[in-house]
Image (tube, rainbow, N blue to C red):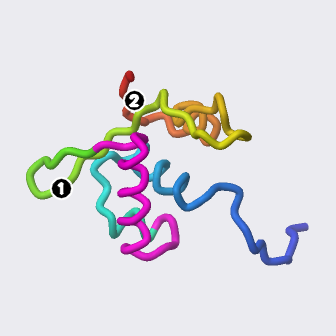
């Protein structure tokens, strides 16, 4: 029997949701990422800017689209997340198509 209580939280942050969108489809549009993550396009743009500023993500313009790359070896500076790389997180949530960049 399925639990009928509404879940009021997610296990991953919006930043992680956007990383997983990029990992699955490096050319995904911001509009699509926002829809998948359940947040606004503006919030998605802010998150991508923060991820780029910290070195987790880079992008290049390819025609009319951006192509994002994730540094799979980059890890968070949070004390509880030390040693967990973006690649390790991706492996944990099973994103087999992640485009990895060696640092």
Q: CA distance from mark 2 to mark 1?
A: 19 Å
Looking at the image, residue 53 lies above or below residue 1: above
What are the residue bounds of the magenta stretch? Answer: 36-58
Q: Does residue 39 show up magenta in the picture?
A: yes
Q: Which residue is painted at 38% across and 57% down in the image?
A: 48
Q: Residues within 10 Å of mark 1 (few under 14, many from 20)?
A: few
> Tag 1 or tag 2, which sits nearer the N-term?
1
Q: Which residue is mark 2?
A: 100
Left or right: 10, with 44 as reference point: right
Q: Which residue is painted at 18% across and 55% down in the image?
A: 65
- Main SS, magenta residues: helix
Q: Which residue is painted at 46% across and 31% down in the image?
A: 72
Looking at the image, residue 63 lies above or below residue 75: below
Q: Does residue 40 show up magenta in the picture?
A: yes
Q: Which residue is painted at 11% across and 58% down in the image?
A: 64
Name, please, the residue furthest toward the top: 102
Looking at the image, residue 97 lies above or below residue 11: above
Q: Quadrant of residue 33?
A: bottom left
Residue 35 at x, y percent in the picture? 44, 71
Quarter of the image with the N terminus is bottom right
Left or right: 89, with 46 as reference point: right
Using the image, tell me which numbered label, if any, was put on residue 41: none
Nearer to me, 6 or 56: 56
Residue 69 at x, y percent in the picture? 33, 39
Left or right: 41, with 60 as reference point: right
Q: Which residue is mark 1?
A: 65
**Element under label 2?**
loop
Q: Please tell me how many numbered marks the rendered image carries.
A: 2
Q: Find out whether the residues at labels 2 and 1 contact each other: C-beta distance under 8 Å.
A: no
**Element under label 1?**
strand
Quarter of the image with the C terminus is top left
């Amino acid at each position: 029997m399925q639990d009928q209580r509404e879940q009021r939280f997610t296990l991953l942050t919006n930043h992680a949701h956007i990383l997983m969108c990029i990992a699955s489809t490096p050319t995904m549009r911001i509009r699509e990422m926002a829809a998948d993550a359940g947040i606004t396009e503006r919030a998605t743009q802010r998150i991508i800017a923060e991820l780029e500023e910290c070195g987790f993500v880079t992008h290049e313009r390819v025609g009319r689209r951006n192509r994002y790359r994730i540094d799979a070896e980059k890890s968070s500076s949070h004390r509880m997340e030390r040693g967990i790389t973006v690649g390790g997180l991706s492996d944990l949530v099973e994103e087999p198509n992640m485009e990895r960049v060696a640092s």
